Image: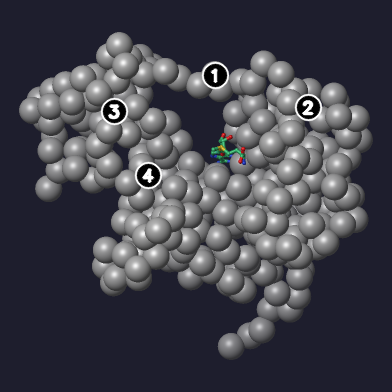
Amino acid sequence: MKLGGEIGYRLLSKVISSRLPNGQPVFKSTLPSTLDLRKETDQEQFSEKFGMAFLQEVQGRRVVDFGCGKGFQAVALAELGAEHVVGIDINRDHLDLARSHAAARGVSGKCRFLDGVADREDVKSLREMVDVIYTIDAFEHIVETGSILEEMWRLLAPGGEVYVWFGPVWWHPRGVHMGYLKPIPWTHLIFSEESIMRVRDEYRMDGKRKYSEINLSQMTVGKFRQFLAESPFHVAAFEAIPIHHCQWLARIPRIGEFFTSVVRCRLIKPREQIDE
Ligand SMILES: C[S@@+](CC[C@H](N)C(=O)[O-])C[C@H]1O[C@@H](n2cnc3c(N)ncnc32)[C@H](O)[C@@H]1O
């Protein structure tokens, strides 16, 4: 049972506005004004997320960045030795920015950015042409999880691999991904979707009333495991990484997921289908 209705909305609205400086959240600009890629080109970022071997693995390979956003990592990977990187996203503004980044860094010839909806045919033409797919912080935003896993399967050449990193997962204290709700950890588990989205609308004013309308997939570790179990992929590695200093809490059955931060896994499309 969650707090909802008029009472839930009013209570949440009051608590949150009283905790915000000047009663208003400060939103980060969604589009950076400079082409400063220093942080994003950091090789350690890839190694930290996908292991030391990842950068070796992508040398001279055809790579897809699924949910590439502004393309920082895709551009970085083209610079770091991938033969070709295709970034796929559904946010046109971010894709435009990604193209400018690639041009500014002189890797437009090795780096292409496609709209998963508008450029559907171009995406389809990559069928079985991709060696490695990676996806960073996207599965908690990808509402069509099952069909995107199918898409990844279609794009990969036999033997190809998917590297996944996403979080915070839904049951994380800040799994709802709204910075201004920070004062109350697990807000989304205490208050109803309707109350939270009404409070959100006070600040965002875009009339959106469902998590799915703002690309929140409510992805828990358990749900993601289930999607993988239903997919044809071989799960070569799977790790639910605890919140810092909460390792012991994350190990407790049933409640451990409340103290889990991100999911990291590696999926393989086997070279041959084995008939059972
Ligand atoms: C938090 S951003 C992460 C961007 C980038 N990977 C990074 O780490 O900076 C999540 C991205 O997933 C994208 N996304 C959501 N649903 C998608 C879908 N169905 N297909 C492709 N991208 C999607 C969003 O547009 C957004 O750019």
Q: CA distance from mark 3 to mark 4?
A: 14 Å
Q: Which mark is residue 101?
A: 2
Q: Which image quadrant for residue 152?
A: bottom right
* Residue density around tag 2, few if under 14, some if 14–19, many if 20 or more, within 10 Å: many
Q: Are marks 1 and 3 in contact (CB under 8 Å)?
A: no
Q: Estimate the spatial distance between the alpha carbons at disc 1 and disc 2, rounded to whole Å.
A: 17 Å
Q: CA distance from mark 4 to mark 1?
A: 21 Å
Discs 3/4, front: 4
Q: Can the viewer see residue 227 in this picture?
A: no
* Callout 1 amino acid: Ser
Q: Amino acid at mark 2?
A: His
Mark 4 or mark 2: which comes first in sequence? 2
Q: Are marks 4 and 1 in contact (CB under 8 Å)?
A: no
The answer to which of marks 4 and 1 sits earlier in the sequence is 1
**Residues under numbered marks 4 and 2 in contact, where contact means CB atoms less than 8 Å apart:** no
The disc, 1 or 2, on the residue closer to the chain's N-terminal end is 1
Q: Which mark is residue 29?
A: 1
